[in-house]
Image (cartoon, coloured by chain):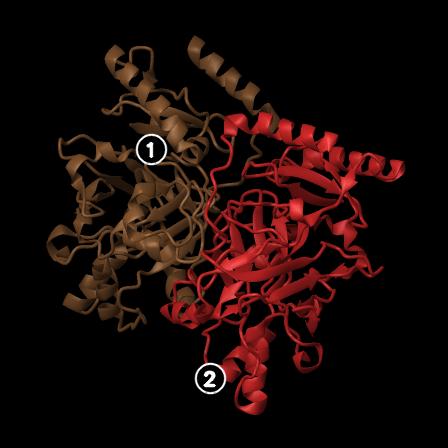
Chain colours: A brown, B red
Amino acid sequence: MKLATLKDGSRDGRLLLVNRDLTRMIEADAARTMQQLIECWDDLAPELERQNVEMNESGWVQAEAFDPVRLMAPLPRAYQFVDASSFLNHGKIMEQAYKLSVKKTPGIPILVQRQSDDFTNAVDDYAFPSEDDQCDFEGEIAVILDDVSAGVALENAESHIKLFTLINDVSMRGHLFRELQMGFGLINAKPATTFAPVACTVDELGSSFANGRVNLDMCVHRNNQWFGNPNGREMDFSFAELIRHWAYNRNLRAGTVLGTGTFSNANCREVGSACLAEQRAVEVIDKGESSTDFIKYGESLQFEMFAIDGSSLFGKIDQTFVQGNGTGAVSTPVAVSDQENSYEEISHKENHA
Amino acid sequence: MKLATLKDGSRDGRLLLVNRDLTRMIEADAARTMQQLIECWDDLAPELERQNVEMNESGWVQAEAFDPVRLMAPLPRAYQFVDASSFLNHGKIMEQAYKLSVKKTPGIPILVQRQSDDFTNAVDDYAFPSEDDQCDFEGEIAVILDDVSAGVALENAESHIKLFTLINDVSMRGHLFRELQMGFGLINAKPATTFAPVACTVDELGSSFANGRVNLDMCVHRNNQWFGNPNGREMDFSFAELIRHWAYNRNLRAGTVLGTGTFSNANCREVGSACLAEQRAVEVIDKGESSTDFIKYGESLQFEMFAIDGSSLFGKIDQTFVQGNGTGAVSTPVAVSDQENSYEEISHKENHA
C-alpha cells in the first residue's frame, strides 16, 4: 500500500490511499488520519488493504489525480522523531576532513532526538533566514513505528516498522559544529524536516528490503543536475539494531519516526553523496579545500528512490529554497471541533469540482 | 485556572478543571483534551474560564474528589519537548567537580531536544532496567506553548506561554557523559519525563512570575526527607529568551513543551539542589569525593511548589522507583473510533460510583 495525507485545513490532514504508479489518490475509508491508522494498525490496516485491492480491481477510476502540491507530509506531525547516523562512512569522512574526533562507543549507534511538530511537504518552498546558516540537505529513509515497549528484543524490533518514506533532513551547517561541540544535540542546526509525498508498506519494497536495510539508491539531484546516488545497503546498523538501542529504557509510542541518517557509501567518489557537507569534506581531503557551495536562495533539490521495477517508490521531493523564517508564519488551522465540517466541505467541493 | 487530564483508556485522556485547593476536579466543557485546548486556546480558554468561575461560585459541589492516581500527565504526549539548561550555576558546578569543559557560546542557551511521546504521571511507579544506569531526578518548571512562528520577536515570545507545570526530568547519569561526549544529545540518558498532576495558567502564579521567571522554591524531598529548595529566580535566561533562540529558524507548534532545566542556586550549599548529580558534585569539590548515592529501587521522590499563599500550585510528584523496562509494557489503548464510547462508559460508571 502507498499512503499520503491531503491538506484539508486541519493539522493532521486527511489520510489518502495512492496507487502504485503514483497517478491516482483517494480518501482512505479505514482511518481519517495517518496517526489514527498507526495507533490501531492491526485493526485498520486490513480494512485499508481491502480498499486498496478493490481500487486496483476497479482501476482507480473514481479516484482523483495524484497531486503532491495538495499533500502534506504523510505524517504531518509526530510525537517523536529520532534521526540516526547509521552510515558510519559519513562520519569517518567528516572526521578525516575536519580533524574531528567524535567519541563513539563501538556497537552503539548515534541517535539524535529531533523535533517532530512541524514536518514539511515535498514540494512547497523551504524558507530559511540567512544563507550564512549554510543550508545543506541530507537524503534518508525514515520509518514509522507502531507501539514499541521499552526493552524490546532485537528479533521483535523490525516488526514494529509499519511504513517507509524518504526525507530530506535539512541541516544548517553554520550552527552544526557549535552545537555538536556543546554536546547537547542539535537545535538551530536542524530546522523542519521535509518528507516525500508518499509512505509505503514493506511489501512495496519487495526484495530490496533485506538484512534490515533498504538496498536501493538515494537519487539526489541539485538544480536538476545529478549529485549522487548512494545505496542504503551500507547502513552499519539495521533498523532493528537502532530500535533496540533506542528503546533500552523507554517506550516508543505509535507514530514514532526513525531516520537512517544521510546515505553514504565507501565509494562516494564514484556514486556521490546525499549531502553537500560530505562532498565538501571529500574535496578537502582530496584537494585541500572545498569548491562545492552550500544552498543559495533560489536553488532547488530533488530526491527520489526507485523500486527494482523502476517505479518511484515515494514520489519526488522537489523543493526550492527561499529566504524567510522557517516554514513561514504559523497560520491558525480550523478548530478541532470544526474539522469534520471543514473536511466535509472540502470533500464536497472536490466531488463537485 | 488549574487543569489536569483523567486516565480514560485513551492516549490523550480527558481534560479536567481542578479547583485552586486541589481537592475537586470536573470534566472541562470547552475541550475534550489538553492538546485540543492548546491548539484553539484563544477560542476555548474563555469558555473554560467561565466554567471555572461558575464552579467557584457553586462551591464545586457537583465535582469529584481530586485524585492524582486517576490522572495522566496534564499533557500526556506532545509533538515537541525541549529541555533547557538555563541555570548556569548547575553546569558550572558540574564542570568544576569533574574537570569538564562544555563549549558554551556566551548569550546562547543550552537547549536539548527531547522525546515527548510518553510522559508519565505524578504518582505511578517509575521503572528503570538497572541501578547501574545511575538514576537521578531533576526538578524543573515546564511551560506549554501555543503556536509560535519561526523568527518570533523577543517581546512577543512570552505571550505564547499558556500553562505552567512541574516536572521531574529523570536522568540516567550512567549514560549521560558518554552521550554528551559524543555530541549528538541524549537518548539512553533521558527516559520518560514525569509531570505534576496539574498545569495552571499564569494568573495562578500571581506576582511570583516576574522577570520571565518563576520566582518560587522547588521543594525536593527524597524518601520524604528534605533534599533541597532552590529558587527559580536564578534562571540565567528568561523563558522569552529561550523561546526566541529556539524559534530562530523553526515554528514551534501548539502543545510544545519547554523545560527550564534543573533548578540550581549559587548558594546550593545552603538551599540544596534539585538533582543528585549537583549534590554529588558539590561533595567532590568540597570533600574530594561524593557520598550521596544515586536512586536505588524502592526509593521515593517528592517534588512540590507552593504559591505565595502557601497553596500547592501543581500538586505533588510523589513517585517510587522500581525495577522494570521503562514505564512498563505499552498496553494497546482503545481504538480512536471507540474512544467516545469508552469515555462515556467510564464517565457513566463514575457518575454511578
Q: Looking at the picture, which amino acid does disc 2 mark?
A: Lys
At horizontal 26% and vertical 73% (from top left) the residue drawn is: A99
Q: Looking at the picture, which amino acid does disc 1 mark?
A: Pro
Q: Position of residue A185 (x, y in %)?
A: 43, 62
Q: Position of residue A145 (x, y in %)?
A: 37, 42
Q: Position of residue B242 (x, y in %)?
A: 58, 59
Determine whether the residue tagged by mark 1 lies in a helix, strand or loop: loop
Q: Quadrant of the N terminus of chain A?
A: top left
**Mark 2 highlights which residue?**
B99
Residue A197 image label: 1
Picture quadrant where residue B70 is located: top right
Task: Report the front residue among B13 and B57.
Answer: B13
Q: Viewed as shown, does residue B194 lie left or right of A5?
A: right
Q: Chain of mark 2?
A: B
At horizontal 12% and vertical 57% (from top left) the residue drawn is: A267
Same chain for marks 1 and 2?
no
Q: Residues within 10 Å of mark 1 (few under 14, many from 20)?
A: many
